[in-house]
Image: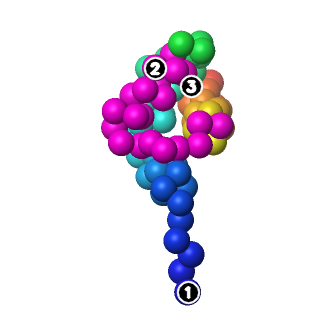
Amino acid sequence: MALKLSTEETNLRKLTRSPIPMNFVKKKNGCWNHQDWLDFLEYLKGKNYFPIDSDRVGLLLEEKKAQYLALKNK
């Protein structure tokens, strides 16, 4: 029997599969401030990614940042 995911989890999975997080990291060159973060969350709201766990979105961005910087420094 399949487990039904919460809307937050579904939205996070959808975001993880999208290019949006990496595009944000690239646009900010791997460095953003708190206002950029808040603006990103507002952008996600506008793209119907809410509700979503913002802490996990932050972790996702940090993962993408690490990938971006690793590729950039090759």
Residue under the point 63% across and 42% down? 56
The stretch in magenta equals: 36-55
Residue type at mark 2?
Asp
Residue type at mark 1?
Met
Quarter-of-image position of residue 55: top right
Residue 69 at what x, y percent from top left?
A: 61, 27
Q: Residues within 10 Å of mark 3 (few under 14, many from 20)?
A: few
Residue under the point 56% across and 25% down? 72
Which quarter of the rendered picture does the N terminus lie within? bottom right
First along the sequence among labels 3 and 2: 2
Label 2: element kind? helix
Against 14, residue 35 (above or below) is above
48 in the magenta segment: yes
Residue tagged 2 = 39
Residue 10 at what x, y percent from top left?
A: 48, 57
Quarter-of-image position of residue 20: top left
Which quarter of the rendered picture does the C terminus lie within? top right
Label 1 to label 2, Cα distance in Å? Answer: 39 Å
- Residue 25: assigned label: none
Q: Residues within 10 Å of mark 2 (few under 14, many from 20)?
A: few
Residue tagged 3 = 72
Q: Residues within 10 Å of mark 1 (few under 14, many from 20)?
A: few
Residue type at mark 3?
Lys
Label 1: element kind? loop
Residue tagged 1 = 1
Camera-side residue of 48 and 69:
48
First along the sequence among labels 1 and 3: 1
Residue under the point 36% across and 42% down? 48
Label 1 to label 3, Cα distance in Å? Answer: 43 Å
Label 3: element kind? helix
Residue 23 at what x, y percent from top left?
A: 42, 30
